[in-house]
Image (spheres, helix red, strand yellow):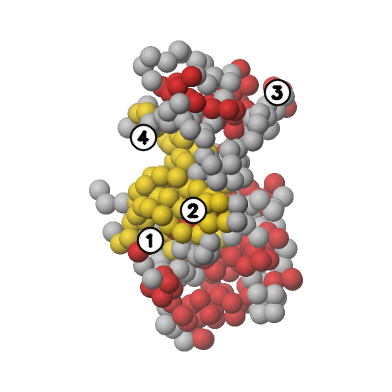
Amino acid sequence: MKHLLEVKDLEVSFHTYGGEVKAVRGVNFHLDKGETLAIVGESGSGKSVTSQTLMRLIPSPPGVIKNGEILFNGYDIAKKTDKEMEAVRGKDIGMIFQDPMTSLNPTMRVGNQITEVLTKHQKISKSAAKERVVELFRLVGIPFPEKRVNQYPHEFSGGMRQRVMIAMALASSPQLLIADEPTTALDVTIQAQILELMKDLQQKMDTAIIFITHDLGVVANVADRVAVMYAGQIVETGTVDEIFYNPKHPYTWGLLASMPSLDSSTQAELTAIPGSPPDLTNPPKGDAFAPRNPYAMKIDYEQEPPMFKVSDTHYAKTWLLHPDAPKVEPPEAVKLRMRQLSNSYAKPVLAKDGE
């Protein structure tokens, strides 16, 4: 089956005064129509650089795609010119950024900002575009849309501004939507509403979504599959159930153990991952996670592990899966989180906050 998006051996570097920063190192993944893939990892793991590279938004220089293919509908985005990418951004691939206030023009009415997108990509009249903006506002749950399209960004709350950004990203009915930490700046209640809104819109529009986040808990009810990134590489990938209930990489164990529990009856102390991510101007030999891995073996410091197959949909980049490796069980803190997850992350209720 032909995938909507297929990333092959992607390598992205930034040339700085301190040397070449190898931000993305041999990343591979795919995405099908109507599917949601979550890419998770600590700050500096390369997930945002990966997402921006898909849109060809990394500044060049200093950023450069050193190797790999980004096949979207069979065409390699990595080889498109900036002029060719103008026809792709917004029309075929939409993006929601972390902070809508840095993405929305504070001097323009929000309706006019979305109208510009529609007239550029849809080639429709301004009057038809304005009617479409009202429909989009209604679709994303913004009350009194006829009035609010004429307001400025500062007149919206954080949650409502993010809904405006979602409406803008969906304006041209893109086949792929990239959401880069879209709920980080929102409180928990609004965060749940935005996540459920995106899931609801995906079902209505059959849009594929790449969801970038540092928080595994955020994607529990949103994603179909999860890719865990560390030091510019994907170290584990699988379905949501496989990552949450049968994780294999020690880094994934660390992310799960660091998740706060919503179950007050079984509170456990949060477990931090010791150490810091490596300096990617000089990536370490062997497994990049080895210095922070309490289960690291000698081979972890000498040779980079391959992706071991756990199932047809589940792979992990750790020597612990080698047949000759000692059998290691996840820590008790991880097992506790795994037991809590089935109840802790119940489906949020989509509510309109009436802002």
Report the residue marked by disc 2.
13
* Labelled pair 1, 2 in contact (Cβ < 8 Å): no
* Labelled pair 3, 4 in contact (Cβ < 8 Å): no
Q: Which mark is residue 16?
A: none
Q: Residues within 10 Å of mark 2 (few under 14, many from 20)?
A: many
Report the residue marked by disc 3.
268
Q: Nearer the viewer, mark 4 or mark 1?
A: 1
Separation of marks 4 and 2 at Cα, in angstroms = 29 Å
Can residue 129 be spotted in the picture? yes
Q: Which amino acid type corresponds to the residue marked 1 in the rendered image?
A: Ala
Please determine whether, in this image, residue 156 is positioned above or below residue 217.
Answer: below
Q: Which mark is residue 78?
A: 1
Q: Which amino acid type corresponds to the residue marked 4 in the rendered image?
A: Thr
Separation of marks 1 and 2 at Cα, in angstroms = 14 Å
Q: Nearer the viewer, mark 2 or mark 3?
A: 2
Is residue 72 found left or right of 178 in the rendered image? left
Q: Callout 1: helix, strand or loop?
A: helix
Report the residue marked by disc 4.
313
Separation of marks 1 and 3 at Cα, in angstroms = 45 Å
Q: Which amino acid type corresponds to the residue marked 3 in the rendered image?
A: Ala
Which comes before the other along the chain, label 1 or label 3? 1
Separation of marks 2 and 3 at Cα, in angstroms = 39 Å
The structure residue drawn at horizontal position 58% and vertical position 38%, both measured from the top left corner, is 278
Q: Callout 3: helix, strand or loop?
A: loop
